[in-house]
Image (spheres, rainbow, N blue to C red):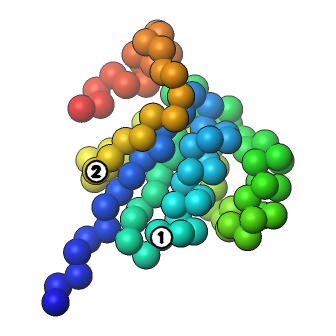
Amino acid sequence: MKEEPKKTVLFLCWGNACRSIMAEALTKHYWGDRVEALSSGISPLGYIPPETLKVLKETGVSTEGLRSKRMRELSLDSVDLVVNLSCLLYTSDAADELDGVD
């Protein structure tokens, strides 16, 4: 039987420092063999707070490769599902970040 390609999910929030980072890490931990997980932010913090990393490590979830990033750094062509983890308001920051995204 031919193996199905992995589906790709993008977890999006404002700062890409806690919620979306944790969602990315947990998805990779539990379903990484079946799902490609990504995360990004509209206005990323630029770093991951130590508390976020501590919680993930305490639960045995790898933090390797995690970083706070903008949507523009990702190739969105292959994303199958976007999960919005914040109350995204339509602001000039959001409009600039989403400009050109289908």
Q: Earlier in the sequence, mark 2 or mark 1?
A: 1
Query: Which amino acid type is shown beneath numbered disc 1?
Result: Gly
Circle 1 Cα neighbour tier, 10 Å, few/some/many (<14 / 14–19 / ≥20): some
Task: For residue 73, say whether it is visible.
Answer: no
Which quarter shows the C terminus?
top left
Residue to which mark 2 is pinned? 80
- Specify whether 100 is left or right of 44: left
Pinpoint residue 83: horizontal percent, then vertical percent. Answer: 42, 40
Q: CA distance from mark 2 to mark 1?
A: 15 Å
Q: Which mark is residue 16?
A: none
Residue to which mark 1 is pinned? 32
Secondary element at tag 2: loop
Pinpoint residue 92: horizontal percent, then vertical percent. Answer: 46, 10
For the point 68% across and 67% down, the residue is 62
The answer to whether residue 32 is above or below residue 77 is below
Task: For residue 92, say whether it is visible.
Answer: yes
Query: Which amino acid type is shown beneath numbered disc 2?
Result: Asp
- Specify whether 88 is left or right of 6: right
For the point 40% across and 16% down, the residue is 95
For the point 58% across and 60% down, the residue is 26
Question: In the current view of this chain or complex, which residue is farthest to the left?
Answer: 1
Asked whether the beta carbons under mark 2 and mark 1 sit within 8 Å of each other, the answer is no
Q: Quadrant of residue 29?
A: bottom right
Pinpoint residue 34: horizontal percent, then vertical percent. Answer: 38, 71
Which quarter shows the N terminus?
bottom left
Q: Quadrant of residue 47?
A: top right
